Every structure is written in C-alpha cells, then in structure tokens.
Image (cartoon, helix red, strand yellow):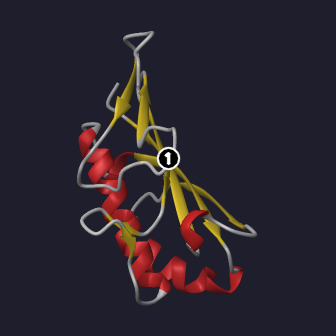
Amino acid sequence: MEQKNSVIKAIQSSRAPAAIGPYSQGVAAGSLVFLSGQLAIDPETGKIVQGNIEDRVHRIFKNIRALARAAGADLDRVVKTTVFLTDMNDFAAVNKAYATYFENNPPARSAVQVAALPLDADIEIESILLLDC
C-alpha cells in the first residue's frame, strides 16, 4: 500500500492469511487499526480449517491476534467487531468460542447473517483496535 500520509500504514503479517483480493490485511490510521474481515483460513495451508464452527472461530482469532500483534497491540485492544454468518443458527456456538477471547470488557459487536462469504466460508469477523494513544 502506497503511503500518502505518514499517519496511515498497512498492517501485514505472514502469521495471518494473505489478502485474497486488492486490499490490505489491515490499516492503521492514527490510533485506530482496521482489520479486514478474517476467514478461518490457516495461513500455512491457505485453506479454511475443517471441523465445527467453534474451530473456525478459534482460527479466525489466531489470525486477528497475529495482525493485532503486527500492529503493536493484542486482543485486549479490540473495541469493535462485526461477525458475518451464513447461518444465524450458528450464533450460540459462535458466542461460546468468541467469549473465550473477551472475558473482561468485551468489545462492541454486530452480528449479521449474509447470503454468502468468500471461499464458501460460513463465518467472517472484522475488527477495529485502538492503539495506545
């Protein structure tokens, strides 16, 4: 990503899956970090992890944590997430796995059902983090 302003920079990590289109894994803009939606892709294989929806939530948070760390933060700096599900019947199972990452002060969150996600995924989570000011 070409930097036009020193306050805006791309966030990248080889410990998270590479972008599957013309976008950055994340972008830091001042004290905020906007992470692109993460699918449950294992960065070593490039494939969506098998198993149940909870397994995929855990993979997604490994990816989010890798990008947060690349930005100089961790999951405790997440202030907002958006969860995209292809089946809202997975909501309770997603909540169970999601809650293990935010035991104290969970971020604001939206959850929506969508018709489809890239790579036929059943879940995607995007995040916004706040860096130390």
> Total number of numbered labels?
1
- At 40% from the left edge and 15% from the top edge, which residue is drawn? 3
Q: At which x and y percent is residue 115?
A: 75, 70
For the C terminus, which image quadrant? top left
Give 46 or 132, whichever is nearer the viewer.
46
- At 46% from the left edge and 89% from the top edge, which residue is drawn? 52
Give 90 or 47, whichever is nearer the viewer.
47
- 52 over 110 or under it: above or below: below
Secondary structure category for the residue under label 1: strand
- 19 over 88 or under it: above or below: above
Query: Which residue in the structure is indicated by mark 1?
Result: 36
Is residue 51 something one can see in this rendering? yes
Q: At which x and y percent is residue 124?
A: 54, 64
Q: What amino acid is found at the position of numbered circle 1 in the picture?
A: Ser
- At 41% from the left edge and 26% from the top edge, which residue is drawn? 31
Is residue 103 something one can see in this rendering? no
For the N terminus, which image quadrant? top left
- At 24% from the left edge and 37% from the top edge, which residue is drawn? 72
Q: Is residue 75 left or right of residue 53?
A: left
Q: Is residue 10 left or right of residue 45?
A: right
- Tell which residue pokes out farthest to the top in this image: 5
